[in-house]
Image (tube, rainbow, N blue to C red):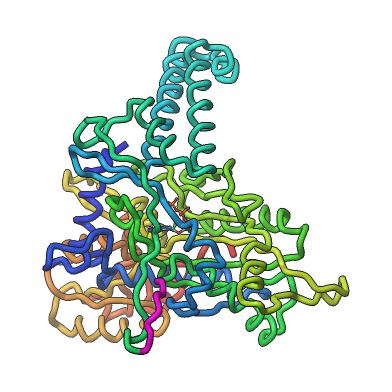
Amino acid sequence: MMNQDDFFKKITSHAKEYGFIFQSSEIYDGLSAVYDYGQNGVELKNNIRRYWWQAMVQFNENIVGIDSAIFMHPTVWKASGHVDAFNDPLIDNKDSKKRYRADVLVEDFLAKIEDKIAKEVEKARKRFGESFDEQQFVTTNARVLEYRSQHETISKRLYSIMETNDLPAFKTLIEELGIVCPISGSRNWTDVRQFNLMFSTQMGSTADGASEIYLRPETAQGIFVNFLNVQKTGRMKIPFGIAQTGKAFRNEIVARQFIFRMREFEQMEMQFFVRPGEELQWYEHWKQERMKWHLSLGIPASKYRFHNHEKLAHYANAAADIEFEFPFGFKELEGIHSRTDFDLEAHQKYSGKKIQYFDPELNQSYVPYVVETSIGLDRMFLAMLSYAYTEERLDDGSERVVLKLPPVLAPVKAAVLPLVAKDGLPEKAREILHSLRYDFYCQYEEKDSIGKRYRRHDAIGTPYCITVDHQTLDDNTVTLRDRDSMLQDRVNINELRRYIAEKIKPLVG
Ligand code: ATP
């Protein structure tokens, strides 16, 4: 596994060099955990969004989309619980002056114990060879049992501290475990404090009584408060869903992981409204559907796994993450949550308006239950970028960097390249570009040798390069070069559309 810092250095410099991602306000030395998408980044990001939107809205008769505002009435965030409970416990190291999430420090400690168990298992596997029975080993080996019991005791303490919000106990736990600051190596910690993650600002001038409002920390609430609007005007029948993509803002305490954890980011969320009592069936359904969506991009299934939550948020009766294997390990990419009727009930209470659905089949009214799927657009971008980034040594000894992006997500679908910039080849190449560009984003390039142009397009993940040469003028054929295999085929210009369309077709859906 590549070291996390090295990997981020590679990815960030590649992402910058090829116009995917820039640090925000870079000429002023940047703004921490905020990023801008460049000319290729915006295409990749839009393609991910479109791929999601098509799967959720276009392919489901009973899901519609909305686009709600970032600013919302401040009471929304009282009702949702964010004003009172959207906190992270933070702790500072007095020597390094670095700030950490107290829960993450303990979780990292737990992960180290898991690593130790994994190492014992590996050692034993080597020792016993063929006859190794892992199940038996982990349930009987004294050292593993000791690690497991440590793990369990610490997890239980962590959960109970988080549940009861017992901040002094948090500090005691960190001290007892002897957790040191990874930077200074010291145990010189401040007390643990709660820190609300919402950004606030003022709306209106102070003269006419400005009010404090928040930048939304999730897109979901815009859907909940529009539940009745959409249900009535769209004549939607339960079960049905509302989808939306858009910005969310969180004043994250620890934000040193490139676009994995940003202070301004985008979410793609879908809230599915169901009959009370049917939510767990729908929760299972959406877990499977969302996993299928990920796999339809052609990335190996071994890169994904479910992580079922044992500790549930106060509003949920079931929750799981879809984790992706980033180069720094398996981490949350998407959450699927069964949120009960918590949000709609709360908005009903705080607004004093009835938020109910009359179910004609049951002949009764109720507050629907909700199953949500929530994925970070930027985090999906990072998953794709880190999966796709490949350094290859070629047969001739040279190296190439290629982004093996799923073709449907690639910023540019085909590059149209005249072999030389003369003899009528540029004109012919432009003619081809113009015939394709209604259907696919294609780019024309004539500068530099053909080899260099191929490399540039490999580096941004363009699935096909179309090269126009002198033979093209005679027989209307071009060479079609495949990004991954680098094989070149001679094909008729009239066939190009079919080739590209076939290449970018998703695997299912
Ligand atoms: P985490 O535990 O990583 O802080 P979370 O459980 O708070 O995430 P949710 O509130 O469930 O996340 O948000 C849904 C999705 O939004 C996450 O799965 C993730 O992909 C994305 N997301 C959340 N916070 C951020 C962030 N700060 N930067 C980028 N993406 C984020």
Q: Quadrant of the N terminus?
A: top left
Quarter containing ligand 1? bottom left
Q: Dividing the picture into quarters, in which one does residue 338 lie?
A: bottom right
Q: Position of residue 454 (x, y in %)?
A: 22, 63
Q: Which is nearer the eye, 194 or 133?
A: 194
**Above/below status of 405 relative to 437:** above
Q: How many marks?
A: 0
Q: Is residue 212 magenta?
A: yes
Residue at point 63% right, 74% down?
63
Q: Which is nearer the eye, 162 or 427?
A: 162
Q: Which is nearer the eye, 41 or 92?
A: 92
Report if residue 59 is visible in the image. no
Q: Position of residue 149 (x, y in %)?
A: 52, 21
Q: Is residue 27 magenta?
A: no
Residue at point 52% right, 38% down?
159
Report if residue 51 is visible in the image. yes
Residue at point 42% right, 44% down?
325
**Above/below status of 91 relative to 365:** above
Q: Quadrant of the C terminus?
A: bottom right
Q: Which is nearer the eye, 399 or 150?
A: 150
Residue at point 85% right, 77% down?
360
In the visual, does 176 lie left or right of 98? right
Magenta residues? 208-214
Q: Position of residue 155 (x, y in %)?
A: 50, 32
In the visual, does 157 lie left or right of 256? right
In the visual, does 429 lie left or right of 177? left
Q: Position of residue 212 (x, y in %)?
A: 39, 75
In the visual, does 150 lie left or right of 186? right
